[in-house]
Amino acid sequence: MENKQSDLHAEVLVLGGGPGGYTAAFRAADLGKQVTLIERYPVLGGVCLNVGCIPSKALLHLARVIHESEEVSEFGVEFGPPKLDTGKIVQWKEQVTGTLTKGLSGLARQRKVKVVTGLGKFVSERILEVVGSEGTQRVSFDHAIIAAGSRATKIVSFPNDDPRVMDSTDALNLDEIPKRLLVIGGGIIGLELATVYHALGSRITIVELMEQIIPGCDQDLVRPLYQRIRKQYEHIYLSTRVTEIKALKNGLKVAFQGQGVPESETFDRVLVAVGRRPNGHLIGADAAGIKVDEAGFIPVDDRQRSNVNHIYAIGDIVGNPMLAHKATHEGKVAAEVIAGLPSAFQALTIPSVAYTDPEVAWMGISEQEAKEKGLEFEKASFPWAASGRSLSIGRNEGLTKILCDKTTGRLLGAGMVGTNAGELIAEAVLALEMGADAQDIGLTIHPHPTLSETLGFAAEMIEGSITDLIVKKRMN
Amino acid sequence: MEQTVLVPEIGDIENVEVIEILVGAGDAIKPEQSLITLESDKATMEVPSPFAGTVDRVLVKIGDRVNEGSEILRMKVSETAESSPRPPADPGAPEPGRPAIEAVEDHQSWLGPPDEVHMVAEPSAPPPVLELPSQHRQTAHASPSIRRFARELGVDLTRVRGSGRKSRILHDDVKHFVKAAFQKPRGDLLDLDRWSAQPEVDFSRFGDVESRDLSRIKKLSAAHLHRCWLGIPHVTQHGDADITELEEFRKSLKPELELQGIRLTLLPFLMKGVVAALQRFPDFNASLGPGGEALILKRYYHIGVAVDTREGLVVPVVRNVDRKGLAELARELSELSAKARDKKLKPDEMQGGSFSISSLGGIGGNAFTPIINQPEVAILGVSRSGIRPVFRDPDFVPRLILPLSLSYDHRVIDGAAAARFIVFLAEILGDLRRLLI
């Protein structure tokens, strides 16, 4: 067709330098492929590293320190109110992300992965056009892995140009610590940032459309978090819709619709965290013949292959849950399949974590799902009020729950709420992947005193061998 | 409205290979049009479309193994009167394992009579959630590394017995499974290899030749027949039956049944006669138990009937012949052979036979030695009947004589029993009133 089709050729082209994209690129390079990675921003790492998981965790760490130092005053250690220097906080946060992104560039260099900066769009099923600051270039490829991620959902009717209306990226910049902050969306992202701003001194209101915060998570796991933040925050409006935001000089006037909620209230800032949308419609998929559904997801098979044979897709852009650890796993699958290895996405579960205070983490099948599916299961729920470790860090509201198959005893799902639940859930994921049953978990010696014991205790409750509680159950 | 077409009920067989994909994305499809061809170790079958519409995406590849309920393809279904109006469905990502709204609707299914067809309607609200193929979920007790290893070797873990604690599948179990598959003493592949291990001859040295691929059914039945031939010590007992009166009776019944659209051939009479003989000699209605230690006697009378099709030989099974009349048998036979010729026999319609009949009567010949259809222990071959002079003191009289050839497994049946069987059968066919005794 054209004489000069491309400026550059890649055996494997990866579109998007987030966790899924760079993992795919590095894995492909390690498997002997010549790889080009296209990233629109001058740094690698994507949303996760730059404006998502990592910086939010840095800020959440500070939030935790602030809260804990407050709380220990009850136990006889008093620090006095913290002095906050948001400039310095942001600097530190950027230092954290900077260290990581620099590390990534180094890893890319060592692997001879060519990184091209610019916005990539397919112009045919073999060529991607990259528009960067230094002009446009065309990259032809044998295989492509689309890892172009997602973006925060914007609600068109809101005054989105007003700097006081923030998305999660804006919120992480800490331009201002508002007196009153409204968080629209009681999902993981909204609740995590609410935790940060609350610790930094904002009064928080949360509004959620569904009848519980973190919709989709079992209610008993959410309850301890809800009860804690209900006391900390001004309001949590559930089953409530925001109908309008009016930008006034003295604040943002927000109108609500729901039962028992005020008609409107004025806030200094609003964080819109109502979910993320896949970027499937922004990458010129049509020109390559890639099927994208209405929502913007690219359907793929268990080898991450799209409807176009040599084009793969991974991460947020192929479906929920939009989680970095799902994307990295899928990225490896795609790279390995391209390298001719018999890989496929075979994981049994993708764990979810809300890094709130307390943290909420779950994996496998939820109790609600198990009931809906009519599965025969046994459940055990160990209250952290009976955990010495939990009490000794001044907390008693946690919970570890496991669900096991009634016949085989094998672990079906687990959920935890409490300090460090996000770290603790990993053991349950391993147990599930290994096909462990309650007995296997109960017979595994957990170190004492730790929060990790609670998983062992929950398993013992199913087995009936627990001694740390009185359980009305069959005793073996 | 978008629909996912699933593999319909295919009996109790699993992991059927997709060997042919007959449609592609964008194709307009009529109801009943064949979509894909599946092949089990018994036969091939084509899966017809339950709907009219346009193929959106084919979800299977040649070589995939599918089960009842596996997704075949997605199609845009042309609106039909019975489909209720729904909001435009989200043409979402494939959602393996996600139990979307599963509706059971009455539609033409793959074998004519209305049957249940499971359709997965696309949910419109939640975005596709990546979930995991349901058969992986909690079925095979194996860790991620073992699952990967099994995948590399193409091993279906649901078929591997785990030797670990609580039947966990270990690395060695997968290895042994593969090893056993290769060392199977009479596995199809090996036998065919050995069988075809004749010196290669360049026939073109002697004149023009043409090489033609065997049909799939031929290849499959070749392996099966070869196994039967090698594995069973065959003996064939020949005999004659005088069917002069039977034929008169048949001819007298014919017009009456034709009014009901039934064509009465000799075969239903043979089946009834055979069942009477099986009831008298139950060892013929049996299979050899594992290790040849026991004889498994069957209390049912399912008769396999060899049908010649363009693709090769298939053996549909007529069930409970003892409980059916001639008319019903005749009707069933013509239905089954029509299905056989259209390649629409379901696997379970070719399973469970306890005795087989192979009739070449329509063609000719005097006698032949049919091969027993393992795990059955005997088969009746029938050749062409003809008028023969029969000596009935004091004269020869012309009688219609039907040649019978009974092959039997000599491990189970001895020669005297076989001779008694064929004599008894000849007596029944000679005088049908004996069926009433």
Image (cartoon, rainbow, N blue to C red):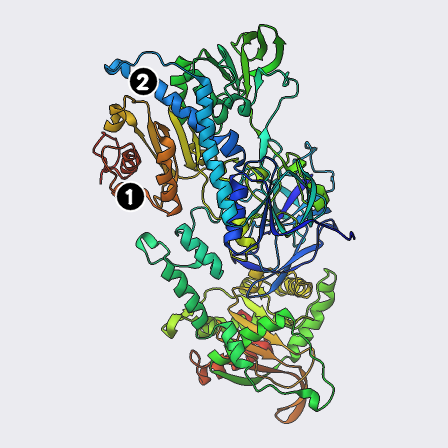
Q: CA distance from mark 2 to mark 1?
A: 39 Å
The mark closer to the camera, 2 or 1, is: 2
Chain of the residue on which disc 1 is drawn: A
In-front residue for pair B235/A198: A198
Q: Residue at x 39, y 65 (%)?
A: B176
Q: Which mark is residue A199?
A: none
User: What is the three-letter code of the residue carrying label 2?
Assistant: Ser
Residue A342 place in picture, x, y as percent: 51, 56
Q: Is residue A436 left or right of residue B55?
A: left
Q: Which residue is mark 1?
A: A439
In-front residue for pair A84/A417: A84
Q: Are marks 2 and 1 on the same chain?
A: yes
Q: Which mark is residue A69?
A: 2
The quadrant in which residue B296 appears is bottom left
State which quarter of the image contains the C terminus of chain A.
top left
* Badge 2 density bin: few <14, some 14–19, many ≥20, Cα 10 Å: some
User: What is the three-letter code of the residue carrying label 1?
Assistant: Gln
Residue B76 place in picture, x, y as percent: 70, 43
* Badge 1 density bin: few <14, some 14–19, many ≥20, Cα 10 Å: some
Residue B52 visible to an observer of this rendering = no
Residue B172 place in picture, x, y as percent: 36, 62
Residue A208 place in picture, x, y as percent: 52, 19
